Image (cartoon, rainbow, N blue to C red):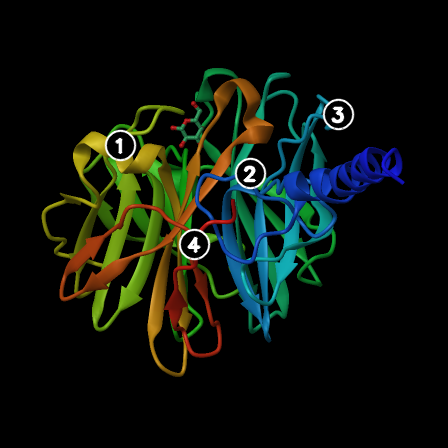
Amino acid sequence: MRRCIPVLFAVCLLFLGVSLCPASGKRARDAICPGASWRDTDGHLIQAHGGCILKRGNEYYLFGEDRSRRNQPTRRYVGCYRSTDLVHWHYCGEVVSLKNPDPKLFTNDWILERPKVLYNRYTHQYVMYAHIDGRGYSIARVAVFVSRTVAGHYHYLRNFRPLGHQSRDIGIYQGRHGKAYLLFEDRPTGFRIAELSRNYLRVKRNICLIHQHLEGLGLVHYHGLYYVLGSHLTGWGPNPDVYATAKSLHGPWSAFRNIAPARTNTYDSQSGYLLKIVGTHRTAVIYMGDRWNPGQLWNTRYIWMPLQIGNGRLWLPKPRCWRIDVHTGVLSYPRPAK
Ligand code: GAL
């Protein structure tokens, strides 16, 4: 018996090791932990960088750049994920897997970045805008895609410069009455807010030109004010993101202020999207940013955090694990899993 004890002990350790170790690395968390590696319900790293979220019914759809290592080098991909709680994401597939659509215009190292998706209530179509560009980001256009279903194949339509202007990083905003707006960085001057046509397939008219060189643009309407957010132009490297407010999209816009202590460089992240969740108890606005990893873009991390917002002020608190009851809008901050 005495000889059995160490053997039993070793067997137990082995069992514990086998059953716990692989799981702990890939275990789905029960909270959103900014900066942590984030896996989908199949255990793969979530590939939705520079993305956005669209709500349909009770489900949230996350779209973003898929930078997986298995990608074919000639194609550019947009990944799509579905969730009911913003924590657990089910992979729906590549909704865009595009070959260079315009080889005369774009070189081999062309890019498709920052996809943004809207639902059009008149045409019942899903419309995607993305930044499309060539070597050195000198072509500066948008690409437009459409799909009949939210997580279906997005068919490429065309690319163009919105209202003839250069367009690099883009953002999107949908107002309450079905009007939608494209935000885009217009390098010589600043950034613009432009209204889309009724079917969302064209950029119809300029609403506001803001003389501030910003990208990674996000916009939200909260308690009677618009808040626009962006980062300075420092490529993949983070900088202190800023915001401004206005009563109308036409402006006038307030002065820009930092959203976090400047020394943190927005907690090493770059803004990309603002998600508003209107709950029965409260409305939350979530900052969705990227902590880019340019050498390993597939391993870029997500910095998603509820913002402190209201009365013309917007502030990004120090990132920590959180979750939200998407029904009530109530936030909680569980301790991080060890
Ligand atoms: C950033 C931009 C990213 C990507 C990167 C490339 O300024 O926000 O989306 O284009 O530059 O350097």
Q: Earlier in the sequence, mark 3 or mark 1?
A: 3
Q: Residue at x 34, y 32 (%)?
A: 268
Q: Residue at x 21, y 58 (%)?
A: 250
Q: Residue furthest front?
A: 2
Q: Amino acid at mark 4?
A: Arg
- Some atom of ligand 1 lies within 8 Å of the CB belonging to the residue at label 1: no
Q: Which residue in the structure is indicated by mark 2?
A: 37
Q: Find residue 310 and report its horizontal and vertical position in percent.
A: 19, 66
Q: Which residue in the structure is indicated by mark 4?
A: 335
* Number of residues whose C-alpha sits closer than 10 Å to that of mark 2, classed few (under 14), some (14–19) or many (20 or more): some
Estimate the spatial distance between the alpha carbons at disc 4 and disc 3, rounded to whole Å.
39 Å
Estimate the spatial distance between the alpha carbons at disc 2 and disc 1, rounded to whole Å.
20 Å
Q: Which residue in the structure is indicated by mark 3?
A: 72
Q: Nearer the viewer, residue 231 or 211?
A: 231
Whether pointer 2 and pointer 4 mark residues with C-beta atoms closer than 8 Å, the reply is: no
- Secondary structure of the residue carrying tag 2 is loop
Q: Find residue 56 and report its horizontal and vertical position in percent.
A: 59, 70
- The answer to whether residue 337 is above or below residue 276 is above
Q: Nearer the viewer, residue 195 or 67?
A: 67
Estimate the spatial distance between the alpha carbons at disc 2 and disc 4, rounded to whole Å.
16 Å
Q: Residue furthest bottom?
A: 280
Q: Nearer the viewer, residue 111 or 167?
A: 111
* Number of residues whose C-alpha sits closer than 10 Å to that of mark 1, classed few (under 14), some (14–19) or many (20 or more): some
Quadrant location of the N terminus in the rendered image: top right
Q: Earlier in the sequence, mark 4 or mark 1?
A: 1
- Secondary structure of the residue carrying tag 3 is loop
Q: Find residue 99 and report its horizontal and vertical position in percent.
A: 72, 30
- Residue 174 can be seen, yes or no: no
Q: Which mark is residue 265?
A: 1
Q: Nearer the viewer, mark 4 or mark 1?
A: 4
Q: Amino acid at mark 3?
A: Gln
